[in-house]
Image (cartoon, rainbow, N blue to C red):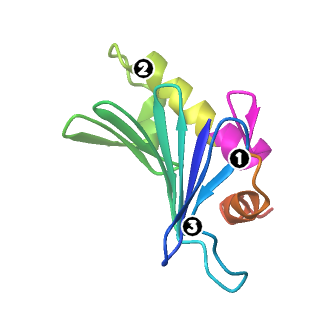
């Protein structure tokens, strides 16, 4: 898993070995977004949304999914019957796993500030 943390002043890149490269932010700088590349998936975490992409398919966490130019509410995932259903279910489970366990298909997110940023998307009981 490759992780990119985006700040106003630059980007920090964390490679597969956990080594940090690029920009060194100060403690006062606010994390704007996170980009996670894992196998064939691209995950973008913003302050107000989490989105996952695979080629022409995208999904916004607990909101909607899009296949090509056609957009559907997330509730339609249960009734969706086309070829992409298996990938859509995988994408949905990857997003849920990321938010709840801070892992992507079993691989842990190693950065403390990325985990803090992800916790803003957890549902409050």
**As displayed, is residue 123 above or below residue 104?**
below
Quarter-wise, where is residue 94 in the image? Answer: top right
User: With 17 as the anchor, is 93 left or right in this view?
Assistant: left
Closest to the observer, 23 or 72: 23
- Secondary structure beneath dot 1 equals loop
Q: Position of residue 111 (x, y in %)?
A: 75, 54
Q: Position of residue 47 (x, y in %)?
A: 55, 69
Mark 1, Cα crowd under 10 Å, few <14 / some 14-19 / many 20+, is few
Q: Are marks 1 and 3 in contact (CB under 8 Å)?
A: no
Asked if the stretch drawn in magenta spans residue 103, the answer is yes
**As displayed, is residue 24 above or below residue 93?**
below
State the quadrant of the C terminus: bottom right
Q: Position of residue 46 (x, y in %)?
A: 51, 63
Residue found 41% across the figure and 35% down from its top: 76
Residue found 31% across the figure and 30% down from its top: 55
Distance between mark 1 and mark 3 Cα atoms: 13 Å
Q: Are marks 2 and 1 in contact (CB under 8 Å)?
A: no
- Secondary structure beneath dot 2 equals helix
Closest to the observer, 118 or 6: 6
The dot on residue 85 is 2
Mark in front: 2 vs 1: 1
The dot on residue 23 is 3
Which is more N-terminal, label 2 or label 3? 3
Residue identifier under label 1: 19
Which is more N-terminal, label 1 or label 2? 1
Quarter-wise, where is residue 116 in the image? Answer: bottom right
Closest to the observer, 84 or 75: 84
Specify start and end residues of the magenta stretch as a single range: 96-108
């Amino acid at each position: 898993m490759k992780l990119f943390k985006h700040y106003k002043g630059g980007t920090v890149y964390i490679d597969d070995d956990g080594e940090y490269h690029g920009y060194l932010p100060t403690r006062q700088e606010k994390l704007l977004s996170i980009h996670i590349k894992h196998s064939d998936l691209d995950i973008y975490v913003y302050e107000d949304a989490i989105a996952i992409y695979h080629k022409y398919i995208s999904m916004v966490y607990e909101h909607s999914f899009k296949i090509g130019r056609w957009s559907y509410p997330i509730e339609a995932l249960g009734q969706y019957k086309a070829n992409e259903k298996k990938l859509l279910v995988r994408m949905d489970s990857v997003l849920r796993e990321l938010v709840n366990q801070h892992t992507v298909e079993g691989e842990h997110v190693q950065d403390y500030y990325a985990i803090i940023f992800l916790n803003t998307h957890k549902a409050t009981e």
